[in-house]
Amino acid sequence: MTIKTKSQSDLLAHLVSIYVARRELVRVLKRDLLRGEREIKLEEAEILLGLFRAQTGEYPVIALDEKGFTGLRQIEAAQMLSQSQIHRRVTGLITGKYLEEKLPRRHTSAIKVRLTTKGEGVAAQYWKDYRTFASLVLQGVDASQRLAHLRVNDAIQRKIHGLSLPSSSPSEKVEPVENLLSIFAAAKAIRKAIELEVVLPEGGLSVERADVLVFLYIRGGEFTSFGEIQRNIVQSFSPSRHLISKWIAEMATDKTGLVERQPLSGNRMAAAITQEGRDVVKPILERYKNLEENLTADISKEDLRSHLRINRRISDAIQPRLKQLISAAE
């Protein structure tokens, strides 16, 4: 079974290319840029980086007070994570002496945090390596294409958040790291839209489980090892083999019947989508296509081509899977 696409801006183009690029970036950031920081996960490093950029004034997304403190709500908004997720990660950073907290005078007020010297040192090195890595990945790419890439990611975010498009273009001086940062920002915004408009709660699926189901649908009914599923899904930051097994088990029960499992050699397992699973995926894919068409409707074709080209450049520079994924679906 194959998925027929109508155009280059269809199902597995712009939105999925953002997620594939992010997936490959996450692997490099965790493996190489945070190689010496065993106490810090990528999500926590992103919090430190946001505070550091606000402190230095380089592409700030968080506002600080005169003493360098900010509230958790600003961090929550910048990271697009839930209050509990931010609180848990910030608590870990405070415990590890990467952040210091400012307790409120009143019990009803929220705490504020700022970087410690230790946290600032980690963030500064992470930011330096991040910029170097971005320059290497996008070396030789024309600045006008990188500018177009930024415009597309910005337009997508603004439409999701209900903001009007800017009347003026971004600065002509575009540093490569801005393109990488914009991929993460756009991916977070699109995730919100997917939760609201594509994977509907009444369907009984989470975004991550739907992601597994869509990948198995693209595989056309072939049994695929859990390891390959783990490497190719895009909606989870870092899915463990345990989580993959758990999600598939939940979709393989007699009650759900969306996938079936099969043992492989060496104590491995594989899964394939069933007809019931295909019936569930088809409306999800249709809603996904409608979402992409809505988000990209007002963007020029030239900008969309540059956007897709740069996302592919990033993902192929790390792991050349995007072309394989698109080819499998055409």
Image (spheres, rainbow, N blue to C red):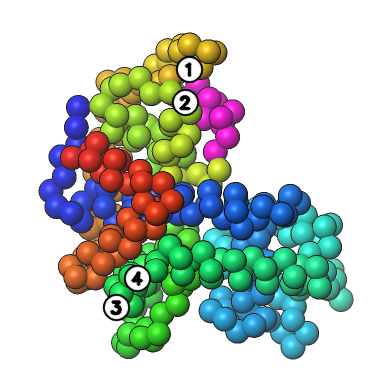
Return the residue nearer the eye: 76 or 309: 309
Q: Are marks 4 and 3 in contact (CB under 8 Å)?
A: no
The residue where tag 3 is placed is 144
**Which residue type carries mark 1?**
Met
Q: CA distance from mark 4 to mark 2?
A: 37 Å
Residue 210 in picture, x, y percent from top left: 40, 36
Does label 2 or label 1 sit earlier along the sequence? 2
Could you say which quadrant of the image residue 70 lies in?
Answer: bottom right
Image quarter hosting the C terminus = top left
Does label 3 or label 2 sit earlier along the sequence? 3
Determine which of the numbered discs, if any, sits on residue 140 in the image.
4
Q: CA distance from mark 4 to mark 1?
A: 43 Å
For the residue carrying disc 2, how many other residues have a C-alpha within 10 Å: few (<14), some (14-19), or many (20+)? some
Does label 4 or label 1 sit earlier along the sequence? 4
For the residue carrying disc 3, how many other residues have a C-alpha within 10 Å: few (<14), some (14-19), or many (20+)? some
In the image, which is nearer the foreground, mark 4 or mark 2?
Answer: 4
Q: Secondary structure at mark 2?
A: helix
Image quarter hosting the N terminus = top left
Q: CA distance from mark 1 to mark 3?
A: 46 Å
**Which residue type carries mark 2?**
Phe
Q: Residue at x 54, y 13 (%)?
A: 267
In the shown orientation, is residue 110 left or right of residue 253?
right
The magenta stretch spans residue 160: no
Determine which of the numbered discs, if any, sits on residue 52 in the image.
none
The residue where tag 2 is placed is 226
Q: Residue at x 46, y 69 (%)?
A: 135
Q: CA distance from mark 3 to mark 2?
A: 41 Å
* The residue stretch that appears in magenta: 239-250
For the residue carrying disc 4, how many other residues have a C-alpha within 10 Å: few (<14), some (14-19), or many (20+)? few
The residue where tag 1 is placed is 269
In the shown orientation, is residue 36 left or right of residue 139?
right
Does label 1 or label 3 sit earlier along the sequence? 3
